[in-house]
Amino acid sequence: MKMTIRKAMLSLTRSKTAKELEKYSIEICKEIEKNEFFQKSNIILWFWSLPDEVNTHDIIQKWAQEKTILLPKVVGEKLELYQFTDISNMVVGEFGISEPTGTIFTNYKKIDLCIIPGLAFDKDGGRMGRGKGFYDRFLPQTDCHKMGICFPWQIVPKIDCAPWDIRMDEVVSTELYLD
């Protein structure tokens, strides 16, 4: 079932043009900026988006001077966090994802908000990632608010979650259909 949903979500997203995805990304980022948890958070774990995810590059660069923005780096089977300082301090890492360089951040309990990608979410905070389990292993080490972000077509009625799958506290998208 999960594989079927994963394939369907990837296919739907890939059927959109880069311009369409960018329009949706802009609207979703506006929703994030209006969010009370985002507004009151000082230390935020983000992700540097892939082409088929909500584009986070501009919003990360915009807020990096006002808030502490952390980005994950894949190291073996786990995530390490580094503070984002500037796009020039990013290097392409495992899985072709741009990752930050610099000083490692290890005080996970100080993170106020984690903004997490997913291929699909349900209205109860169930999340389906890419199947590697990085966030499911990392998030239990935090006490933060967990916000999933996605395109509107990535919200599905139900995701069958295993006991170790971490639910989001909320899912932010846009109800606008911009096609």
Image (spheres, grey):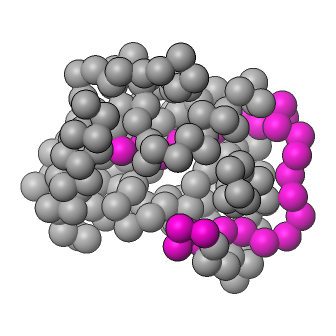
* Numbered disc total: 0
Task: Please state, as top left, top right, bottom left or bottom right, where the C terminus lies in the image.
Answer: bottom left
Q: Residue at x 66, y 35 (%)?
A: 137
Q: Quadrant of the N terminus?
A: top left
Q: Residue at x 64, y 27 (%)?
A: 145
Judge whether 165 appears above or below 88 on screen.
Answer: above
Most foreground residue, 113 or 161: 161
Return the x and y of residue 74 as percentages of the image width and height. Answer: 67, 59
From what the image shows, is residue 92 above or below residue 31?
A: below
At a point 21% along the width and 62% down the height, the residue shown is: 14
Is residue 87 something that shows in the picture? no
- Residue 23 position by quadrant: bottom left
Which one is in front, 61 or 2? 2
Quarter where residue 54 is shown: bottom left
Q: Residue at x 61, y 77 (%)?
A: 92
Q: Position of residue 116 (x, y in %)?
A: 53, 42
Q: Is residue 172 a member of the stretch shown in magenta?
A: no
Residue 141 visible to an observer of this rendering: yes
Tell me which segment is drawn in magenta: 94-119
In this rendering, the answer to whether 178 lies above or below 31 is below
Q: What residue occupies the far bottom of the structure in this picture?
A: 88
* 117 in magenta: yes
Front-most of residues 178 and 154: 154
Q: Which residue reaches farthest left?
A: 179
* Residue 87, position as x, y percentages in the image: 65, 77
Left/right placement of residue 81 relative to residue 32 reads right
